[in-house]
Amino acid sequence: MRWSLELAQALVVLVLWVCCGSGTGCPCSDRALCEPVTVEHEFEVFVFDVGGKDWKYYDWSKVTTIAAFGPYDPDLLCYAHANQVRVILREKGRLSGDLIEVFKIMNGFDRAYGEKNWQDVTSATGISVLVHESQKVSMQVTFNVPWSPDCIDGRCYDFLRIANSCDFLFVMSYDMQSQMWDNCFAKANAPYYQTLSGYSAYINLGIDSRKLVLGVPWYGYDYPCTQFFETGRCVLEKIPFRGAPCSNAAGRQVPYKEIVQHVHKSITGRYWDDEQKVPSYIYMVNNTFHEVWYDDPQSISIKSAIMKKLRLRGIGMWNGNMLNYSDDHFIVKQTEDMWNALCPL
């Protein structure tokens, strides 16, 4: 039986938690807030946080889990626990002594499908032991997986086994143009039908739909066009990736808070693509056309309906920091609409 170093370290943390409890190193004024969150939510809203203080302005009436991707923030943990929201560690590598102390008062950990030693994790029974031990202390173990199980970016894993060995899978239904095989045109980051097909493929593997959380992007891609014919026909520089002749590496990621500032100043304004069910816009700089594909409340609401259609566990986004949390009335409304799109009526 082979265990990855990170997996073994995580198990050590669990042993420390079970043996020593979470009483040491509590950063909260109320020590009860350092105890595990045991509330079970029927509907999951999973938020990645990459640091800073934006979390103060999240819609805490919706959030159920925060995956802390940035530097550890004790204030976030205390505030989240006060709202019965789990905070899990986005485990990115070896656990230092400081992180082990942090891990003791968090609610679990999250890992991504593309990390090193993934094959060790999927081939070992160690992950089953880890999840079993985590459940004893109300820890949550989640894995981030690509938008489809069909060997995306050349990564072919036993996703059914992974799903059966953790609490749920966070399906990253974005960056779908990492490999472009058909033509070198700018396309949507997360087209609706492609998104739907990914979840259907996971379910067809035998994975319980309640083990799947729908991941949506709070960002888009800005593509410079080497040639521009019309909306939807922006020719890209050919940047290959894993055998594909073109990829989204020809563009750059743009957070939604930046997009909403630019779309109304663009040549086209917001243009709705009914085939991909997402918006885009065109602008020009230095005599070069740019096509920006992104998601907004309308496109996210449409994708959110997949949850009810397929009875998924919930929804989440990359990432909570991509919105503008200023107190400007117009911006406040835009931000509220994005949060509300996660949970359509």
Image (tube, helix red, strand yellow):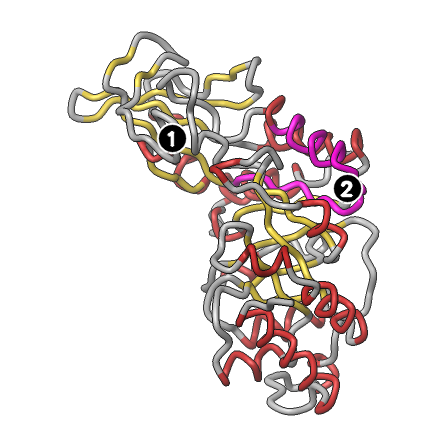
Q: What residue type is labelled 1?
A: Gly
Q: Give the range drawn in magenta.
A: 195-217
Residue at 35% from the left image edge and 26% from the top image edge? 246
Secondary structure of residue under mark 1: loop
The disc, 2 or 1, on the residue closer to the chain's N-terminal end is 2
Q: Which amino acid does label 2 sit on?
A: Ile
Q: In which image quadrant can residue 266 be found? A: top left
**Residue where numbered disc 2 is placed:** 207
Residue at 39% from the left image edge and 26% from the top image edge? 264
Determine if the magenta segment contains residue 198: yes
Question: Which image quadrant: the N terminus?
Answer: bottom right
Determine if the magenta segment contains residue 324: no
Residue 26 appears left or right of 230: right
- Expressed as whole percent of the image width and height from the top left, the position of residue 46 reads 65, 52
Q: In this view, does 242 lie above or below 58?
A: above
Q: Is residue 101 above or below residue 278?
A: below
Q: Residues within 10 Å of mark 1 (few under 14, many from 20)?
A: few
Which residue is at the front of the view, 80 or 251?
251
Residue at 70% from the left image edge and 91% from the top image edge? 20
What label does residue 243 carry, if any? 1
- Expressed as whole percent of the image width and height from the top left, the position of residue 280 reads 44, 22
Secondary structure of residue under mark 2: loop
Residue at 41% from the left image edge and 35% from the top image edge? 259
Q: Distance between the residues labelled 2 and 1?
A: 29 Å
Q: In which image quadrant can residue 298 be found? A: top right
Of tags 2 and 1, which is closer to the observer?
1
